[in-house]
Image: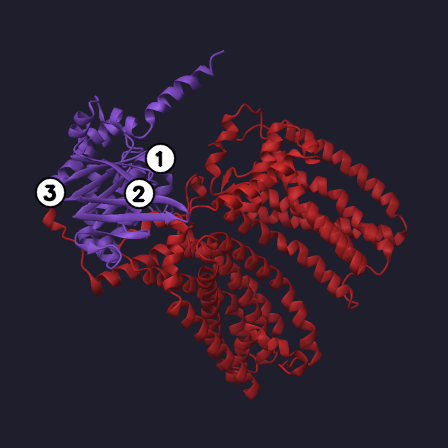
Chain colours: A red, B purple
């Protein structure tokens, strides 16, 4: 009898070969799908926010993607290539964002090592299961994103054939994105070695995320004039040869080859897409798949590079203990929160993945205005400059809202255990860190850009309305005792209310910029700035007073 | 069951495990001891196939760690110190997933899981309704132990298994591993709770700075060194006596 009262011979060692492989494939698919849809951590989630139903969450995500895909209606009646390129651009960017934010966590999860690495699973099987789930989910997303375009395309010149061609090209695009991301990781492992792998994964994820968000805003305005330029029958020629380098063009060409013009150029580019996809998949899951095991082990066994970490710590110590920060951070609690926030903004992978890509659009929108204004469209260069600084106010707002969430949120119990009357000093430290580490460098960049693009020196004054509003904007997340850094579970970071706050702040920035431009054109900018400063000081003072009296929220 | 020959592991210039050699036969409970950073967890991770040794060899149930890592993994159960679980799964979903990874059919796995639930006094409702993230530390530990034993492995590695368990569960667990050893399983038990090790283990292996310091039955080792307990032996071997003096001196700094 076994210790638990059951004859041991009833439970012989499980089988090998075929049945084990099938059992593992099914279990791993189910596991990674659930982890993806529910999130990896549920600890500390409030009961009503705990993820329970895979179906409802997936339904919500797909509905959102369907809504985004409504943009295809704008291409009603357009040639196959134009509609396909538009949809493949969006799909490519959304899938890139999806893979950038999800793949690192799915493929190389540190906590997973203690759960799965001692189980009898071949690394290649583990990799296959993870990528299969990523591709599966990306196909659902791509399908939802293109649902409207299938309807629009079937009524266009391509007819029903467009639906078939576009479905095939979307599948190819998803496979290309998945293969490309895995390939990048494998190559990083091979080229940069284990020691630098983890930090490189984080950096590359952040950069891909920023590029995807930035590209999402920039690609369509860039393509639009070219579409108009050739009367809506864009093809790739000598004047725009660079388009042939863009993956969405390959996949749109497949649509065009099968359901559109069927030109030799379209077939050629479609062929490039097929070969590129096959090549990327072959490299990622063939020759280089052995590197995956080394990657998993790297996360499990790499000792940190002591020298680099010490250097980073010294840098922060020097920064905080030297003027002007030493004067600015006299309160020890504020200084501690400043250091904590700054360090996490630089080191923490989870936080960086959420903060930096969410800030990217704030920079991109003003650039689109500048881009448009220099071509005689949009709201003019003055507004673009004003909005450039106006959007800076949203920087601390978004950053502070995001910084509240962390995978290590339970460690924030030390804040409540410490003899601190309320969260004000902590949120103030976080606010100052965001202002010093993120907003100030962004402001310097904005001023530099404005100096380059401005045609009239007096327009530089239009930076001031936005700059004056920054301190007020930065206090908004701290109201009600919030914005305590790293104090809430990261799974709660997806709350829709944050999006609403951001949109309200965007509208406020837009309004301030508009009023500034209006005052400038009317010759009242000086008075406007004076009034804005007085108002900002009043509001700032009232907000600080309110924040200072805030107490800890209930832990229930 | 376990044969370790000149096992080494380095992380860059840092040597974590240095030339370890030992054998563990079937039916033996071996306490694997050492101070923090001695290389215990690294050794266990190597023996469970989680990380590759830098040099040396090891065989588990006759399977070579480097040549047949999957076979080694089929024959071992491991309770890691971290007690990590997928928190977004319910306890039952997690255990069913683990069973499937070992190819155990659901018809076999379900009654087996029920037996563990009964043994650990877990509520079936909790296991099916609550996500693991909402479990107490002790409940999570019970699930992790269940996950390690579900496939009935002949070799089991425990890294601080009692962490989080209440006194009754700990007593039950100690009885369980002694029964498992009587059934012929080799048990490696790594812990800092030395009085438990002394009572439960047939033999202890003490390592420090990655090197083997002592290997033998606890009562014989204690008698040979002329000390009263395994804890005293351990502190003398690993610099704990000096730490005791330092602690006494340090405590004086708290005096008003």
Above or below, A180 relative to B212: below
| Farthest residue, direction top | B256
Specify whether residue A510 is in view.
Answer: no
Above or below, A353 relative to A21: above
The picture places residue B227, in percent across and down from the top left corner, at 21, 22
Q: Nearer the viewer, mark 3 or mark 1?
A: 1
Q: Quadrant of the N terminus of chain A?
A: top left
Mark drawn on residue B80: 2
Q: Give the SS element for disc 1.
A: loop
Between B238 and A393, the residue placed more toward the observer is: B238
Above or below, B45 relative to A254: above
Between A179 and A517, the residue placed more toward the observer is: A179
Q: Mark 1 to mark 2: distance in Å?
A: 15 Å
Q: Give the SS element for disc 2.
A: loop
Q: Are marks 3 and 1 in contact (CB under 8 Å)?
A: no
Mark drawn on residue B183: 3
Number of labelled discs?
3
Mark drawn on residue B36: 1
Q: Earlier in the sequence, mark 2 or mark 3?
A: 2
Above or below, A40 relative to B221: below
Q: Earlier in the sequence, mark 1 or mark 2?
A: 1
Q: Are marks 1 and 2 in contact (CB under 8 Å)?
A: no
Q: Residues within 10 Å of mark 1 (few under 14, many from 20)?
A: few
The picture places residue A235, in percent across and down from the top left corner, at 62, 82
Q: Earlier in the sequence, mark 3 or mark 1?
A: 1
């Amino acid at each position: 009898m076994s210790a638990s009262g059951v004859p041991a011979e009833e439970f012989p060692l499980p089988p090998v070969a075929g049945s084990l492989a099938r059992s593992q494939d099914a279990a791993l698919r189910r596991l990674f799908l659930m982890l993806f849809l529910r999130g990896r951590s549920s600890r500390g989630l409030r009961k009503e926010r705990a993820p329970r139903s895979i179906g409802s969450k997936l339904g919500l995500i797909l509905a959102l993607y369907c809504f985004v895909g409504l943009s295809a209606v704008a291409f009603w009646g357009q040639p196959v290539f134009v509609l396909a390129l538009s949809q493949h651009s969006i799909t490519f960017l959304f899938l890139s964002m999806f893979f950038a934010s999800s793949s690192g966590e799915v493929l190389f999860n540190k906590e997973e090592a203690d759960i799965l690495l001692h189980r009898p699973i071949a690394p290649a099987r583990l990799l296959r299961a993870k990528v299969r789930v990523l591709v599966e989910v990306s196909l659902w997303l791509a399908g939802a994103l293109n649902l409207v375009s299938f309807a629009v395309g079937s009524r266009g010149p391509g007819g029903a054939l467009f639906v078939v061609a576009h479905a095939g090209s979307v599948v190819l695009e998803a496979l290309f994105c998945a293969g490309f991301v895995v390939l990048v990781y494998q190559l990083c492992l091979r080229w940069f070695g284990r020691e630098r792998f983890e930090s490189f994964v984080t950096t590359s994820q952040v950069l891909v995320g920023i590029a995807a968000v930035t590209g999402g805003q920039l690609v369509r305005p860039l393509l639009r004039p070219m579409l108009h330029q050739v009367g809506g029958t864009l093809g790739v020629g000598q004047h725009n040869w660079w388009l042939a380098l863009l993956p969405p063009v390959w996949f749109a060409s497949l649509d065009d080859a099968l359901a559109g013009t069927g030109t030799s150029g379209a077939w050629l580019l479609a062929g490039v897409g097929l070969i590129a996809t096959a090549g990327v998949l072959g490299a990622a899951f063939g020759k280089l798949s052995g590197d995956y095991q080394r990657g998993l082990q790297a996360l499990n066994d790499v000792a940190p590079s002591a020298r680099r970490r010490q250097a980073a710590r010294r840098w922060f110590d020097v920064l905080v203990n030297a003027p002007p920060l030493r004067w600015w951070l006299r309160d020890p609690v504020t200084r501690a929160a400043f250091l904590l926030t700054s360090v996490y903004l630089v080191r923490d992978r989870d936080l960086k993945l959420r903060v930096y890509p969410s800030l990217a659009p704030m920079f991109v929108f003003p650039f689109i205005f500048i881009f448009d204004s220099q071509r005689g469209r949009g709201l003019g260069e003055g507004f673009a400059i004003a909005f450039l600084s106006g959007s800076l106010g949203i920087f601390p707002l978004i950053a502070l809202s995001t910084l509240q969430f962390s995978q290590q949120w339970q460690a924030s119990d030390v804040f409540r255990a410490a003899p601190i009357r309320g969260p004000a000093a902590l949120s103030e430290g976080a606010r100052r860190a965001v202002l010093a580490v993120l907003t100030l460098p962004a402001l310097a960049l904005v001023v530099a850009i404005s100096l380059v693009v401005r045609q009239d020196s007096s327009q530089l004054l239009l930076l001031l309305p936005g700059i004056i509003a920054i301190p007020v904007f930065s206090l908004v997340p701290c109201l009600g005792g919030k914005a305590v850094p790293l104090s809430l579970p990261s799974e709660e970071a997806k709350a829709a209310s944050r999006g609403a706050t951001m949109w309200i702040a965007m509208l406020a920035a837009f309004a301030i910029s508009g009023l500034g431009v209006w005052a400038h054109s009317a010759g009242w900018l000086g008075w406007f700035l004076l009034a804005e400063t007085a108002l900002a000081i009043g509001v700032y003072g009232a907000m600080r007073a309110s924040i200072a009296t805030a107490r800890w929220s209930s832990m229930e | 069951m376990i044969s370790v020959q000149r096992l080494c592991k380095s992380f860059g210039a840092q040597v974590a495990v240095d030339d370890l050699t030992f054998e563990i036969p079937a039916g033996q409970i071996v306490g694997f001891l050492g101070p923090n950073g001695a290389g215990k967890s690294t050794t266990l991770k190597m023996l469970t196939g989680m990380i590759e040794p830098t040099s040396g060899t090891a065989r588990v149930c006759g399977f070579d760690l480097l040549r047949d890592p999957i076979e080694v993994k089929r024959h071992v159960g491991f309770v890691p110190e971290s007690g990590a679980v997928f928190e977004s799964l319910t306890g039952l979903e997690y255990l069913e997933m683990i069973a499937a990874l070992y190819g155990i059919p659901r018809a076999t796995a379900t009654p087996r899981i029920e037996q563990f639930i009964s043994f650990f006094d877990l509520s079936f409702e909790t296991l099916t309704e609550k996500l693991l993230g909402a479990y107490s530390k002790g409940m999570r530990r019970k699930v992790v132990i269940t996950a390690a034993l579900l496939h009935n492995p002949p070799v089991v590695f425990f890294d601080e298994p009692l962490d989080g368990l209440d006194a009754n569960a700990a007593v039950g667990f100690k009885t369980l591993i002694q029964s498992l050893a009587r059934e012929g399983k080799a048990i490696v038990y790594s812990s800092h709770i030395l009085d438990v090790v002394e009572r439960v283990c047939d033999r202890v292996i003490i390592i420090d700075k990655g090197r083997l310091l002592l290997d033998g039955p606890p009562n014989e080792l204690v008698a040979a060194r002329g000390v009263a307990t395994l804890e005293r032996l351990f502190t003398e071997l690993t610099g704990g006596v000096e730490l005791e003096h330092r602690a006494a001196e340090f405590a004086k700094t708290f005096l008003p």
